[in-house]
C-alpha cells in the first residue's frame, strides 16, 4: 500500500513538473515578442538618418562662396570703409605709381631712339665731304645734329668781340654747352623716379599709421578687442604699407636702369663732341 502511495506521489510530481516546464516554454515566445518589436522598429531611424546630412553639406559648400564674393578684409573694404584721409593717401600712391611707370616707358623709347641716332652719326657723319653736309645728313631731332650745328655756329660767330677769344677755347665752350644741353634733356623725368622711390614708402606708412589709429578708436568705442574686431582694420592699414613698397620698388629699379643707359649714350655724345672739336680746329687752320 505504501509503495502504491509513493508511486502515486511520484507520478503527480512528474506531471506537475511537466506542466510547469510546458508553461515556461509557452511563456518565453510571448516575452521575446516585445523585445523583437524595438529591434524591428530600430531600422527605421537607420534608413532615415542618411537623408538628413545633405542640408549641412549644402550649407558648408555655400559658405566659402559667400566669403569669396564678399571679402570684408580686401581692397574693396579698404576703399569702402576708409575716410577721406585714407582714400586721399591711396589716390596719391596710385598717381605716383602711374607717373613713375609713364617716365620709365617714355624714357626707354627715348633712349632707344638716341642709341639709333648715335649709330647713324657714326655711320654717315664722318664719311661726309664737309661738316655742313654731314650735319644735314642727320635727323632733325638727333642730338648729334644739334651738337654739330652748335659747332658750326661757333665757327661762324667767331667774329667781333668773340674773335678776340682763342678759337680753341671758343669752340670747346660751344660744344660743351651743347653737350650739357643734351645731357639735361636726357635726364628729364629721372627726378620724378627718384622722388617717388624715396617718398612713396613714407606715404604708405602714413596711411598705415592713420588706419591703425582709426582701428584703435573703433576698438575703444566698441569695448571689444577680439580677433574679428582687430583683424579687419589693422589688416587694411597694413595694405597701405604694401602699396607704398609696390610703388617704390619699380621706381628705384627704373631710376638705376635708366641712369645706366643714359651713361652709355652720353659716352657716345662726348666722343662725338671731342671728334667734332678736333675737326673744327683742323678746318680753321686750313
Image: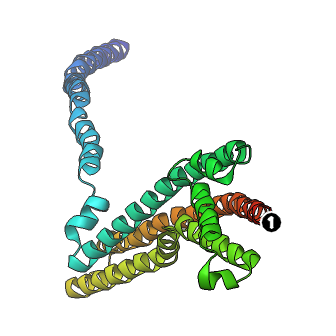
The quarter in which the C terminus is drawn is bottom right
- Residue 256 in view (yes/no): no
Residue 134: x %, y % from top left: 65, 48
Q: How many marks?
A: 1
3 lies left or right of 170: left
Residue 225: x %, y % from top left: 32, 80
- Residue visible at 25% across and 35% down? 53
- Residue visible at 62% across and 70% down? 154
The quarter in which the N terminus is drawn is top left
253 lies left or right of 45: right
173 lies left or right of 96: right
- Residue 176 in view (yes/no): yes
Residue 246: x %, y % from top left: 47, 63
Tag 1 secondary structure = helix
Q: Is residue 217 above or below residue 33?
A: below
Quarter holding residue 264: bottom right
Q: Is residue 226 above or below residue 40?
A: below
Quarter holding residue 75: bottom left
Q: Is residue 15 above or below residue 247?
A: above
Towards the viewer: 224 or 244: 244
Query: What residue sits right under mark 1 in the picture?
Result: 285
29 lies left or right of 113: left
Towards the viewer: 154 or 12: 154
Q: Is residue 140 above or below residue 27?
A: below
Amino acid at each position: 500500500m505504501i509503495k502504491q502511495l509513493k508511486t502515486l506521489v511520484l507520478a503527480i510530481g512528474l506531471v506537475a513538473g511537466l506542466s510547469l516546464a510546458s508553461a515556461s516554454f509557452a511563456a518565453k515566445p510571448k516575452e521575446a515578442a516585445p523585445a523583437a518589436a524595438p529591434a524591428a522598429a530600430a531600422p527605421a531611424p537607420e534608413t532615415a538618418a542618411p537623408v538628413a546630412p545633405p542640408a549641412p553639406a549644402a550649407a558648408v559648400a555655400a559658405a566659402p562662396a559667400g566669403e569669396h564674393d564678399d571679402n570684408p578684409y580686401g581692397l574693396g573694404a579698404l576703399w569702402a570703409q576708409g575716410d577721406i584721409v585714407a582714400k586721399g593717401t591711396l589716390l596719391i600712391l596710385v598717381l605716383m605709381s602711374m607717373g613713375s611707370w609713364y617716365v620709365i616707358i617714355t624714357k626707354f623709347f627715348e633712349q632707344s631712339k638716341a642709341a639709333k641716332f648715335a649709330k647713324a652719326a657714326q655711320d654717315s657723319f664722318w664719311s661726309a665731304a664737309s661738316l655742313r653736309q654731314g650735319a644735314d645728313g642727320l635727323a632733325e631731332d638727333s642730338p648729334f645734329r644739334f651738337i654739330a650745328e652748335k659747332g658750326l655756329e661757333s665757327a661762324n660767330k667767331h667774329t667781333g668781340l668773340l674773335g678776340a677769344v682763342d678759337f680753341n677755347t671758343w669752340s670747346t665752350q660751344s660744344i660743351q654747352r651743347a653737350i650739357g644741353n643734351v645731357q639735361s634733356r636726357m635726364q628729364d623725368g629721372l627726378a620724378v623716379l627718384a622722388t617717388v622711390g624715396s617718398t612713396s614708402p613714407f606715404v604708405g606708412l602714413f596711411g598705415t599709421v592713420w588706419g591703425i589709429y582709426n582701428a584703435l578708436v573703433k576698438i575703444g568705442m566698441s569695448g571689444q578687442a577680439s580677433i574679428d574686431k582687430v583683424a579687419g582694420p589693422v589688416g587694411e592699414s597694413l595694405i597701405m604699407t604694401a602699396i607704398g613698397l609696390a610703388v617704390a620698388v619699380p621706381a628705384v629699379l627704373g631710376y638705376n636702369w635708366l641712369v645706366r643707359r643714359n651713361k652709355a649714350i652720353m659716352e657716345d655724345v662726348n666722343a662725338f663732341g671731342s671728334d667734332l672739336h678736333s675737326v673744327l680746329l683742323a678746318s680753321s687752320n686750313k
